[in-house]
Amino acid sequence: MQTIKFIGCSEELIDSDVLKKTIVSFADKSGFKIKKLEYNFVDLKHMQSLNNDFLNHKNDTDIITFDYSEGKTIIAEVFISLQMMQENASKYKQTVENECIRLISHGLFHCFGYNDKDSKEKMIMKKKEEEFIFAVSRETNHDV
C-alpha cells in the first residue's frame, strides 16, 4: 500500500493530488516504489530541535529527510521548516509555492540517493528539483 501525506501545509499552498502524482511518476521513472512518504511542515523551533537532537547541528535548516528506505522501496519522513521556506522564497525571489515544491522534491531526491554536500552534487540536485517543478507546473497548467 502506498501512502504519501502532507501534514501541516495548507491546501491553498499545494495541490496534494498533483504532487502525489508527480512524486509517484518520478519514483517510477527512477525505479523506486513509495511505501510511506510523510512530509511534515513544522515551525522553526521544532526544526531546530530535530536538527540538534538527531543531527547534532546547531544551525537552522529548511529541510531534514529521515530515510528508512529498504532497497528501492521508499519509507521516509521529511520535515520542512515553514519559516525557512518563506524566507528562502523571498531570498531567491521565488513564490512560496515554488519553494515548497522545491523542498518536497529535494526530500524525495535524497531518498533516491542524491546528495548536496559539494558544488557538483548541489548542481545535480538543483537540476532534478527544476525538472520536478516543471512537471508540477505542467500538471497544474500554470507557472510556479
Image (spheres, rainbow, N blue to C red):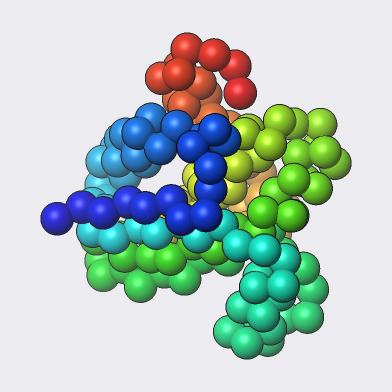
Q: Is residue 114 visible?
A: no
User: Residue visible at 29% across and 60% down?
Assistant: 36
> Is 131 positioned to the left or the right of 81 in the image?
left
Q: Is residue 22 left or right of residue 52?
A: left
Assign the N terminus to one quadrant of the image: bottom left
Q: Nearer the viewer, residue 129 or 89?
A: 89
Residue reaching furthest to the right: 91
Q: Give x and y (percent) for residue 89.
A: 76, 39
> Quadrant of the image for the C terminus?
top right
Q: Position of residue 46 (x, y in %)?
A: 65, 73
Residue at screen point 66% across, 59% down:
81
Q: Residue at x 41, y 19 (%)?
A: 139
Image: 64 above or below 8: below
Q: Is residue 110 above or below residue 97?
A: below
Left or right: 142 as drawn, with respect to 37:
right
Indicate the quadrant where residue 116 lies: bottom right
Q: Residue 30 location in percent, x, y?
A: 32, 44
